Amino acid sequence: MVEFKLRTRHKLEARWRPGVFLGVRRITTEKIVGDKLGTYVVQSIRRVDEGRRWNAELFLSVSGVPWNPGGASETGEGTERELPQAISVAPELPGVAVEAPKAFVRDTVARRVYITRRNLEQHGYTAGCPACEQTRAGTRAPGLNHSEACRIRMEKALAQDATQSSRVMQADERVNDDLERRVRANIGDDEMGEESAPAPASSSAEAPGRERTRSPEAADAEMQPPSRKRAASAELDDSERADRDVVAEINSLLTSSRAEGIMEMAEQSSLNTGGFAVCEEPVDWCQEAWIDAFYDDISGRELDPDGVAKARGEELEFIDKMGVWEIIPRSEAGVTVIKGRWVDVNKGDEARPNYRCRYVAKEFKKGVKGCLVAEFFAAMPPLWCSKTLLIIAVTNKVPNSKGDLTRTRGAKGPLCVKFIDVKRAHFVSKARRRICVELPLELRKHGRDDVGLCVKTLYGTRDAAVCWEMEVTRVMVIVLLFTQGRSSPCLFFLEDRNLRVEVHGDDFEALGSAEDLAWFARELAKIWMIVDRGTLGLPGTAGTVQEMRHLNRLISWDQQGITWEADPRHAGLIIQELGISSGAVSTPLEKEKLGADEDDENDAELAPEDVKRYQSLVMRAGYLAQDRTDLQRAVRE
């Protein structure tokens, strides 16, 4: 026995009824069920519980056959298989004629001349027009129209352009025809015919596509007040006279050229306001660029506006000093202009802020994946490369390039580790392709529509990392005569000075004697702007420090050796997110005894916000487990 769903007359009737499953139609996959009232062809059936699944009484009471469905109602009458007949209601006022319903006709509006981005770049953007502002920024939303002042200015400019004047004329004809259609629909053809005298047959039969021409006599006649033939006894009241004047004015507009009207409106507006406001007029960019609050792009915390303004100013000074881009007019770009944005980050803390602001391009990775790997791939060394240099620093003998064991401590003293940071690394490598970006608001000038043609690579472009890798290889191999590693292109070795270098982005970690490390820093300072963060060495070694932060890890060197500690901030964030205040377990995988109710709660699905929170915690713990072996098993489980 099953339950099947039937169509009901109203919502109060039960839609599911018990029946016996008889089969399935092979063509339509409809189900055939039966009960004491007959057989039915339905689409929806559902099972019932095992206690009600077998019912001999219902099975024996089935009437009808599957090949002739058609159940009966509760009263014994046949089920209606057709829609009920429409009920006609007599009108309450028999004397009033009933009008037939009219079909809905969507009112269409004639499309005016379409203003393209190329037209705006040629004739200039209009200040104060929202469509122009969003078009220039590349963020125009659908349905946003140009302001009327902008449209009048652009139509005037396009009408004077020999290549675009035909588009303006076609748009004028569309608008004139639409206006005439609306007037005739509202006033009527008869009244329109009385107001405008019919033209001669020779002039009315114009060829399609030809413009209407008017003789001087016709033009003078149109300027005369319109007259209407009426009986001598009939007199016009004020309302009829006003209607007549409106119709005459509309007819005059229909027969005149809209282009001339645009010219007159433009000239009149120019006389009244001193000219249209175009993008060449002064605009307070500083006021437009002002933001009340700034937030860290990583942590989301609010930043000090003065500190952000200072950091952005320093970044713009670096861009100008290093010649990152050449400012050119937008019309000379030749390629799609990429948008840009500021990325503001506090690399310190609230007590000791260290604001870093970078203007980055928003170039998305488009194209074939294989092409991206081959053209834009940049290598990054694994974490064990940095650890290997520290291991060699505390080892007595290591193999050289020939495989022979050699002492690490030579005549120049013990080995040390130097950490160097290259400032604005992407700004030193040359761009390999033509890239144009939007200028930040702080660099936009009054009356100009300029973009930045990248001479050097910019943060956020697809090939910025690979261009920097090529620059590093050029300097290390060609200029400084290092040998590039085979296992990773980010490893370099200079056998004459016994220098080993690992490059992680713009961070250089070099292993060698203090004298050779000083030489290496001087050579890099001749080519790039660098920050010598310090030299890590054994306690008692002159010119060294015993603690250093590298890749967000804490590295310390004492008499017992080198200690590598994970970033404690991640552990603090996990504890804070989980709300752990105290308590510990003897083993990381100690199991808790849960009751049946608690087990069911653990099996329940998480809410969407809890899913993101769980994923964030697991990934943070996985990142922390790279340096915390005690967490690796727990994170994996």
Image (cartoon, rainbow, N blue to C red):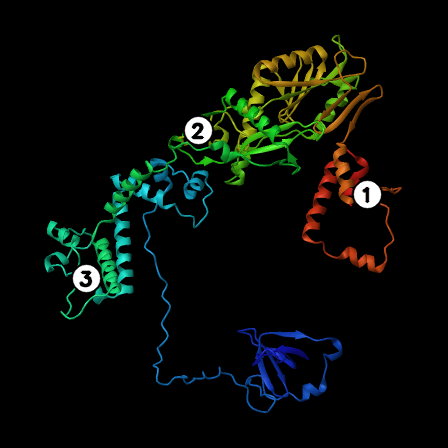
How far from the left and from the top, in percent, is residue 465?
57, 29
Residue appearing at x 60%, y 91% in the figure: 75
Residue in front for this viewpoint, 477 or 154: 154
Tell which residue pokes out farthest to the right in this image: 586
Q: Which mark is residue 215?
A: none
Q: Quadrant of the C terminus?
A: top right
Q: Which label sits on residue 195? A: 3
User: As displayed, is residue 630 above or below residue 87?
Assistant: above
Q: Earlier in the sequence, mark 1 or mark 3?
A: 3
Label 3: state its secondary structure.
helix
Picture quadrant of residue 636: top right
Q: Residues within 10 Å of mark 2 (few under 14, many from 20)?
A: some
Give the residue displayed 21% in from the left and 63% down from the top: 192
Real-space Cα distance between discs 1 and 2? 54 Å
Mark number, residue 580: 1
Which of 181/533 is in front? 181
Residue count near mark 1 (Cα–Cα under 10 Å), binned few <14, some 14–19, many ≥20: few
Q: Residue at x 58, y 36 (%)?
A: 292
Measure the C-alpha gap from mark 1 to mark 3: 89 Å
Residue drawn where x is 32% and y is 41% of the image:
153
Give the residue pinned by disc 2: 445
Residue 498 percent coordinates (x, y): 69, 14
Residue 596: x and y in percent read 84, 60
Given the image, on which type of amino acid does mark 2 rest? Answer: Lys
Whether residue 235 sits left or right of residue 181 in the image: it is left
The mark that comes first in sequence, 1 or 2, is 2
Q: Is residue 404 visible?
A: no
